[in-house]
Amino acid sequence: MKFNKKDARETTGSLGSSLKLARHAQCDRTAERLTQHEVIKRFTLDREFRLNQKVANDARSTWNEFIAVNGIDYLDEVDRRGILRFDAAMRDRGLANSTIARKHWTIVRILKCGGLDTRGLFLPHVLSSYQPKPPSVYTPAQIERLFASADMYERVVFEILLKLGLRKGELESAAFLDVSFDKKVFRVHEHSRQGYRDIPIPDDLLVLLGEWRALHPAQLPIVPNSKGEPNRRFAERLQRLAHRAGLACGTCRGCQHNRCAEFTMHKFRRTCIIGLLRSGMDFRTVAAIAGHHNLDTTQRHLSSVAAINTQSRCFGISDPASTVRHYLNSDAQANRIARIREQLQTLFRS
C-alpha cells in the first residue's frame, strides 16, 4: 500500500487532535478531583452551618488522623487498604471497639459528603460493634428544680426546647416573626433542606412568649445575647443553672468549674420526643414535629418508651414508608394540629 505525504499529514493531524482532547479530558478530571482539604472543609462547613461546632471539630480531628496514617492527597485515592491501615493504627493505640467504630462512621460520613461511594470500603463487623446508648431524658423532678431556679430568660429558652423539641441551632436562629400568636404555631426553618415545619404551641408557652415579647418589643431574635445577636452559649448557661439548682452530679470534670456536663441542650429535645411517644401520639406525627426526615431516627427513641402497648400504638400507622416532610404544613391538618396542641399542653403542663 502506497503511503503519501497527504495521508501522513492527515494522520498526524488527527493523532494530534486526539492527544489534545485527551489532555483536556485529563485536565477536566484533575479539576473535578477533590483534595482531602476540600473534602473536610465541605463537611465541616455543613456541620457549622447547622451550628454543631463540636461535631465539626471532632470530624476534623478524626480526618487528620486518617490522612496522617494514609498520606493521601485526593479523595479518590481512598481504598480498602487505607481503611485497614487506619483500623490497625487505632488498635495499636489501644482504643476501644466503640471508639474505633465511631471514628469509622465519621470517615464514612466525610467520604459520602465528598460524593464517594463507600460500599465495600469498610469492615461490617467494626461498624456494627458500635451500639449507641438508649437516649436519656430529664426526669420531672429535674425539670421542676431547673425551672424553679431559672430566671425568665432561661425559662423562655428551656421551655421552648422542652415543649417544642427544637434543635439548639433552630433555637438560636428563632425569631418572633416565626411565632404566629393567632394560629398558635411556631414555624421552624430547616436551612439544610430549604423547607420548614410548623409546630403547635401549648397555651402556657404561648403566654410566656407573649410576656417575653411585651418586655422586648424591638427584639428580633427571641433569645439573643447581650449584643442582640444569636446566643451560642446556651449549653454553658444550662450547666451553670443545673449547678445552681443543686442538680450537679459532682463526678464529671465540668463540676470542678460549676458546669455539670450531664446537662445538655439536646436532652430537652429527647425528653420532648420520648414524652410524645409515651403519650401515645402516632409515630409519623412525632417524626414531623421533631423534623425527622427518616422514620428510623424517630424509631431509636422507642428504646426509652417502656410500655409495650405504647410501642404498638406508636407503630399503628397506615403507611410507615410515606414522607413526613411538611406533614403539618397542609391546611387540611388544622384539626390535627389542634389535637396535637392539646396533647402537648397535657404532657408538659406546668
Image (cartoon, rainbow, N blue to C red):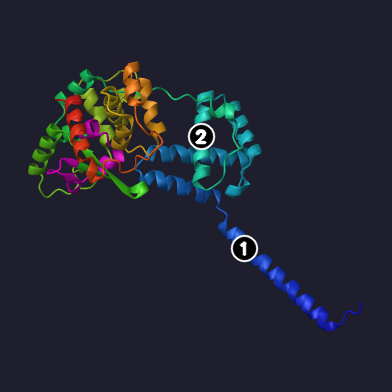
Name the spot of residue 283 as percent of width and height, x first. 33, 30
Give amino acid for label 2. Trp
Q: Is residue 339 left or right of residue 261?
A: left
Residue 88 found in image quarter: top right
Q: Which residues are magenta?
A: 159-185
* Residue for point 62% across, 47% down: 77
The residue located at (41%, 37%) in the rendering is 55
Quick check: is 232 in the magenta stretch?
no
**Looking at the image, which is closer to me, 229 or 28?**
28
The quadrant of the picture occupied by the C terminus is top left
Looking at this rendering, what residue extends furthest in the front direction?
A: 318
Amino acid type, callout 1? Cys
How many marks are shown on the rendered structure?
2
Residue hosting label 1 = 27
Mark 1 burial class by Cα count in 10 Å: few <14, some 14-19, many 20+: few
Whether residue 167 appears in this view of the structure is no
Q: Quadrant of the N terminus?
A: bottom right
- For disc 2, the marked residue is 105
Q: Earlier in the sequence, mark 2 or mark 1?
A: 1
Q: Is residue 131 above or below residue 21?
A: above
Q: Secondary structure at mark 1?
A: helix
- Point 43% across, 45% down: residue: 44
Disc on res. 46: none
Q: What is the x, y in percent for residue 342? A: 17, 30
How far separated are the C-alphas under marks 2 and 1?
33 Å
Q: Nearer the viewer, residue 121 or 285?
A: 285
